[in-house]
Image (cartoon, helix red, strand yellow):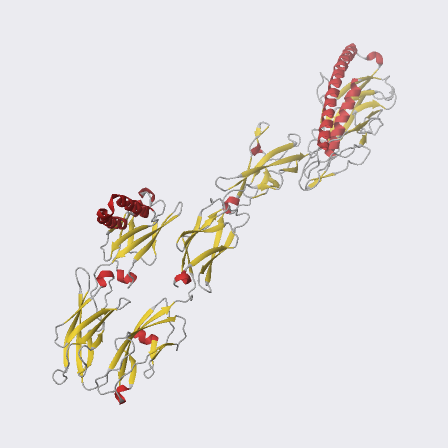
């Protein structure tokens, strides 16, 4: 409990003990209960300290009294501010004791005010709390009474009658209370005595009283000493010399109807306004009754600067504007002096009280600004402390505070003329980054005065928004055999946050592509988002590379999102046709056949087999028979797309027994690539065919029949699997089409085109849909069809670039051709 409260408790307890005998134990109990309620309900910590206390003097255990733990003073940034008190008091953060830091002079701090206290504002952070502490400064008797004039001259006419009173200037004491209560004592004199009286304003008036008549010729001057003693312990004194000059003749002094006047005037009165008109009278006649008015010589210069007096009329007027906040009362001593010889004077006192008007605008002070404010700050977070002041009096000095416009903040009153600006609703920096608040302070005067202060509250960003991509998936087309390190795409993610929370970096989501790591194929630049192919891509090895790129911001903790990239590797004609090996048991790249001369026209005698690792048109092969060196017409021809060598006519005896055919195999790429096959045909008579060849032919026939049986089963299996695949595709298409269309949905493909072949009278229909979704336009269906005798298949425009569909058509042609040829061979 503060020491001030202990002292008050002791005083009250002494009072209760005194009243115990009179009121009984019941009243004593009620008194103690009342005092306990008074102490608990005080709501504010009070201390007291005597002025002039030495440095380090104990004032109170402020941390304990405020309910704060000693260990949390430093972490919570305990600090103390004093309004007008400077560094007079300080707090030891180790033990939480409030002590005197520097000399406290109550008179310098509070002047003539009876009550003097130091208001302390104690602030702690985390969370922010504000406490108000009042430290009362007790007066000690450290100032002796002081006379403003060390020598006072008193003019006394010898004709003055005993008991005449002559006003004297009293002493002043800067202390208050009993320390400033003065008693006066006059040095011993047979002619004069001292008169001391107190008026209704507790002002002490002293005067010199004449005890018996004076004789100027006997004693023209009297030297006296006036001593003032205060009521302190120990007592202090002050002295002044009184020089009484005895004047002769004029024995009637002017007199006023009353010795004291009280005037009230507003502080906004204009210069020249009449304060009072004095009217003194003198019973003498002639020049001895002509009166001149003047301020007494003891009137302070401040009064002379503020007022003027007309010596003839006695009118006191205002010279300068009055200010209630500086001086609220004036005491004016006026002398009325006649023109006799010697002149005589009468005296009166005018007490001018200045009335307050509402002429001061309220003042706003903003402290402890906690800016910027995090957008995730909890409700009730203190943003700033606001203190208001108005030097006016009464309702003119009563100030209220409002906040505008409608913002997620509010003002909370914490103490008289103290407010806290706190967070009232949630913040979102992405919606509004800065708030301009207007704090208005208005007093209770009529008319009221107001002032405003602007507060700019900046909202600090927190990492609450992950980077986002414009679409969840991108489709990229890259030609194979690209140079290593080429740029194939750029991903870009946007983050609504600011500064490092919006700093996005990109990385691959690592996975295995076959037996290799994804990072061996592609890489992404962490800052720019550019995707690079680290090595040449091979369509024959990898047609589709699907992976994810992750975008992460630099916030704490970081937020991120992923985007899927589908990289289609487009085929180029980089593989020449490759000849398949001849039949079992044969060596080399040449095809050797023995045929009978009796073979008729159109008979297939041999076949060149070749494949191309490319796809589409790049893998579509055609066969040409090269002319012989001598230019002779060969009795053989080769199927353009089948590679079957057949006779163009019946063989003759004149035909060479050994026919060497050179077959050129080329694809349809740009430019086309070729391969050459050599076919050696031996023409023999029918009876000259070796038995081993016949047996081999017979065995081959048996093998071919067995192969036919196996192939039949294979065809049935392939048809079953194909039917199941077609059924699945139809069901999937029906489900997709039945779903409501969305912006990112893919539409069905176009109708099927029929592709004819020049090889035979077969036709093949194939519809291949490539489902590619994009947020930039409606989905596309890749429709392909081709025919060797027709122009290339139509072109479909893919997302972001033009895509040639000839590779799809070529694949269909290759599969169709191989399947049909194989089927005919089996048959």
Report x, y in % for residue 570: 68, 35
Res. 82 visible in picture = yes
- In the rendered image of this protein, does residue 394 appear above or below residue 193? above
- In the rendered image of this protein, does residue 224 appear above or below residue 550? below
- In the rendered image of this protein, does residue 391 appear above or below residue 149? above
Residue at 29% x, 76% y is 258
The quarter of the displayed image where residue 204 is located = bottom left
In the image, 138 versus 212, the foreground residue is: 212
In the shown orientation, is residue 189 left or right of residue 769?
Answer: left
Report x, y in % for residue 318: 37, 76
Residue at 19% x, 86% y is 249
In the image, 283 versus 150, the foreground residue is: 283
Report x, y in % for residue 685: 84, 15
**From the image, which quarter does the C terminus lie in?**
top right
Report x, y in % for residue 145: 20, 67
Image label count: 0
The quarter of the displayed image where residue 769 is located = top right
In the image, 796 versus 572, the foreground residue is: 796
Res. 526 visible in picture = no
In the image, 363 versus 221, the foreground residue is: 221
In the shown orientation, is residue 671 left or right of residue 32?
Answer: right
């Amino acid at each position: 409990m503060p020491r001030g409260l202990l002292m008050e408790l002791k005083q009250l307890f002494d009072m209760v003990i005194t009243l115990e005998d009179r009121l009984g134990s019941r009243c004593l109990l009620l008194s103690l209960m009342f005092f306990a309620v008074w102490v608990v309900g005080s709501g504010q910590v009070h201390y007291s300290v005597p002025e002039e206390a030495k440095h380090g003097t104990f004032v109170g255990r402020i941390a304990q009294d405020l309910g704060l733990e000693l260990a949390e003073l430093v972490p919570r940034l305990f600090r103390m501010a004093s309004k007008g008190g400077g560094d007079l008091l300080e707090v030891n953060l180790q033990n939480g004791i409030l002590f005197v830091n520097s000399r406290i002079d109550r008179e310098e701090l509070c002047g003539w005010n009876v009550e003097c206290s130091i208001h302390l504002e104690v602030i702690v952070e985390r969370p922010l709390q504000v406490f108000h502490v009042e430290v009362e400064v007790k007066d000690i008797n450290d100032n002796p009474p002081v006379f403003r004039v060390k020598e006072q001259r008193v003019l006394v006419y010898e004709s003055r009658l005993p008991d005449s009173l002559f006003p004297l200037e009293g002493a002043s004491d800067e202390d208050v209370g009993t320390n400033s209560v003065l008693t006066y004592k006059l040095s011993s004199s047979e002619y004069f005595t001292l008169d001391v009286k107190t008026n209704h304003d507790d002002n002490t008036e002293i005067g010199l009283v004449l005890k018996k008549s004076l004789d100027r010729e006997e004693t023209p001057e009297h030297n006296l000493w006036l001593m003032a003693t205060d009521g302190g312990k120990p007592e202090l004194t002050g002295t002044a010399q009184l020089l009484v000059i005895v004047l002769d003749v004029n024995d009637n002094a002017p007199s006023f109807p009353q010795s004291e006047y009280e005037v009230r005037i507003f502080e906004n009165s204009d210069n020249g306004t009449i304060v009072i008109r004095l009217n003194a009278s003198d019973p003498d006649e002639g020049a001895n009754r002509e009166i001149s008015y003047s301020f007494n010589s003891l009137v302070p210069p401040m009064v002379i600067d503020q007022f003027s007096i007309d010596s003839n009329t006695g009118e006191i007027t205002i010279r300068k504007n009055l200010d209630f906040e500086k001086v609220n009362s004036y005491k004016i001593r006026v002398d009325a002096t006649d023109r006799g010889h010697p002149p005589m004077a009468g005296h009166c006192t005018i007490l001018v009280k200045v009335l307050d008007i509402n002429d001061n605008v309220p003042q706003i002070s903003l402290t402890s600004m906690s800016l910027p404010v995090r957008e995730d700050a909890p409700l009730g977070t203190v943003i700033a402390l606001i203190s208001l002041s108005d030097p006016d009096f009464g309702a003119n000095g009563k100030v209220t505070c409002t906040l505008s416009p409608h913002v997620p903040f509010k003002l909370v009153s914490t103490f008289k003329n103290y407010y806290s600006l706190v967070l009232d609703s949630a913040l979102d920096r992405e919606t509004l980054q800065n708030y301009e608040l207007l704090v208005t302070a208005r007093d209770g005067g009529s008319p009221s005065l107001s002032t405003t202060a602007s507060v700019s509250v900046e909202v600090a960003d927190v990492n609450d928004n992950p980077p986002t991509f414009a679409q969840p998936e991108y489709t990229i087309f890259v030609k194979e055999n690209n140079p290593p390190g080429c740029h194939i795409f750029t991903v870009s993610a946007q983050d609504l946050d600011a500064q490092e929370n919006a700093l996005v970096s990109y990385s691959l989501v690592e996975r295995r592509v076959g037996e290799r790591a994804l990072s061996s194929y592609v890489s992404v630049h962490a800052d720019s988002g550019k995707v690079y192919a680290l090595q040449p891509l091979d369509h024959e090895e990898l047609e589709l590379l699907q992976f994810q790129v992750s975008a992460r911001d630099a916030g704490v903790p970081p937020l991120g999102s992923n985007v899927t990239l589908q990289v289609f590797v487009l085929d180029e004609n980089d593989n020449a046709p490759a000849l398949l090996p001849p039949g079992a048991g044969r060596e080399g790249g040449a095809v050797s056949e023995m045929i009978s001369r009796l073979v008729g026209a159109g008979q297939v005698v041999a076949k060149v087999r070749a494949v191309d690792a490319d796809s589409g048109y790049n893998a579509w092969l055609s066969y040409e028979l090269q002319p012989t060196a001598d230019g002779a017409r060969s009795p053989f021809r080769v199927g353009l797309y089948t590679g079957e060598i057949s006779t163009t006519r019946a063989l003759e005896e004149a035909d060479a027994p050994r026919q060497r055919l050179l077959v050129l195999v080329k694809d349809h790429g740009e430019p086309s690539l070729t391969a050459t096959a050599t076919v050696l045909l031996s023409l023999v008579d029918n009876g000259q065919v070796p038995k081993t060849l016949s047996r081999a032919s017979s065995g081959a026939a048996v093998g071919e029949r067995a192969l036919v049986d196996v192939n039949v089963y294979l065809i049935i299996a392939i048809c079953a699997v194909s039917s199941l695949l077609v059924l699945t595709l139809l069901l999937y298409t029906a489900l997709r089409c039945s779903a409501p269309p969305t912006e990112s949905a893919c539409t069905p493909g176009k109708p099927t085109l029929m592709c004819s072949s020049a090889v035979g009278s077969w036709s093949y229909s194939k519809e291949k849909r490539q489902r590619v979704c994009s947020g930039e336009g409606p989905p596309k269906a890749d429709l392909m069809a081709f025919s060797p005798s027709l122009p290339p298949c139509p072109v479909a425009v893919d997302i972001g670039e033009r895509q040639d569909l000839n590779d799809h058509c070529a694949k269909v042609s290759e599969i169709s051709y191989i399947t049909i040829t194989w089927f005919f061979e089996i048959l």
